[in-house]
Amino acid sequence: MSDFKINSIATKQGQHGPVIAGVSTVNSTGCMKIPSGPTEHRGGRGRLVFGGGYDYPSPYTELGTMDMVEISTLGNAVDFGDFTQARYAHNMGSSGTRGIFAAGGYPGNPTNRSQVIDYVTFQSGGGANDFGEMSVAPIRSAGFGNGVRGVFAGGYIGSSPYGTITTMQYVNIATLGNSIVASGEINPGPDQAHGNKSDMSVADQTRGCIGGLLTHYHPASTQTNSIVFVTTATLGDSQDFGDLTIARDNSNGVSSSTTRGLFYSGSPGPGTHKNTIDYITIQTKGNAINFGDMTTSGNSGGAAHGSNLTRSVNHDSGAENTLEYVTITTLGNTQDFGDLTVARVVYAGSDNSNGSIA
């Protein structure tokens, strides 16, 4: 660790001693210490927590357990504790210190929808704590954010025939409380009345992009290749971004760097699965481009993903407990990362590398 002298540090408001992740500062003349080690681990970054889902194979029981990996180090996951409520098909958000897991389905009647929002402290472990409740309780919403605000967009609700919704809601990750319904919606209007039953969302610090929208869900789904985006700080109505390389939903998950977003695999229709990985440049509207392939095609991963801005770790739903990775800046196929502690499907992952880059 290196020390060096500074005369003063000031925020934009002229106040001394700003909080910088992983950096110790003082109010006036003094020392600032910058941690050594890989950049993605400075400030404890680069940790990915998976939680919930179904066990696999049968009896398909909802899980409340969590696993954790260090993204920069290949290897198997370790136990991270339990949720306050077992559930599946939920979604997530994060800041540099806290991960949140929201909504989903829970044991009992298959139409049950959880309103629970849990949170974890990445560097502490020991399980989740209660954060608040969702104002609307969907299953399989898209989760993203900017490190301050966590956003949950769309999903589906009700009993068969299930209906997709266009609602967006958000929480302030640092403050415990219930979600707030945003004024904007996903693809509003009679000509764009697509809800969202997709885990496919990527984000940077200003924009969230959602791919694979549906006109409705079960018993007859209509997948699209649409990608839309919203401005995270304001959450007005979504706008058109471009198209995926193929129409699909039920993504295995997605990951982002500060510039590039990856959409993994998914289902273009009932009983069909693709191992395709697409990518977009988040601040540049346009169609997605092929990145490479996952080892196995599938559509059951849910939002099971994370990144340290350099490496993206994802779930291989064909192997069920297998994790794979790619280097986000380098086009190519996935490689083996390690295994989860238990085989699971339709679960979620939250990382602390870039604040809810989901």
Image: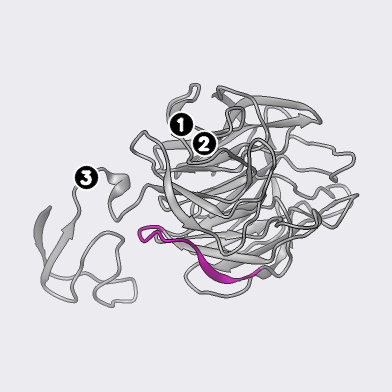
Residue 211 in the image: state x and y as whole percent. Answer: 68, 41
Which label is found at residue 325?
1
Q: Which picture quadrant has residue 288?
A: top right
Packing grade of label 2 (10 A; few <14, some 14-19, many >=20) is many
Q: Which stretch is magenta? A: 122-133
Q: State which mark lies toward you, 3 or 2.
A: 2
Q: Secondary structure at mark 3?
A: loop
Q: Residue beneath label 3, please?
A: 37
Q: Secondary structure at mark 1?
A: strand
Residue located at (65% from left, 55% from top): 87
Q: Residue beneath label 2, please?
A: 314
Whichever of labels 2 and 1 marks the residue nearer the N terminus, that label is: 2
Whichever of labels 3 and 2 marks the residue nearer the N terminus, that label is: 3
Is 218 placed left or right of 85 in the picture?
right
Packing grade of label 1 (10 A; few <14, some 14-19, many >=20) is many
What's the distance in space between the residues labelled 2 and 1, CA to CA? 6 Å
Is 211 placed left or right of 3 in the picture?
right
Quick check: 238 above or below 265?
below
Residue 9 in the image: state x and y as whole percent. Answer: 21, 69
Disc 1 marks a residue whose amino acid type is Tyr
Residue 113 in the image: state x and y as whole percent. Answer: 74, 60
Disc 3 marks a residue whose amino acid type is Gly
Residue 283 in the image: state x and y as whole percent. Answer: 54, 44
Is 281 placed left or right of 156 in the picture?
left
Q: Which picture quadrant has residue 346?
A: top right
Q: Which picture quadrant has residue 6?
A: bottom left
CB atoms at circles 2 and 1 under 8 Å apart?
A: yes
What's the distance in space between the residues labelled 1 and 3, CA to CA? 21 Å
Q: Is residue 156 visible?
A: yes
Q: Secondary structure at mark 2?
A: strand
Quick check: 291 above or below 280?
above
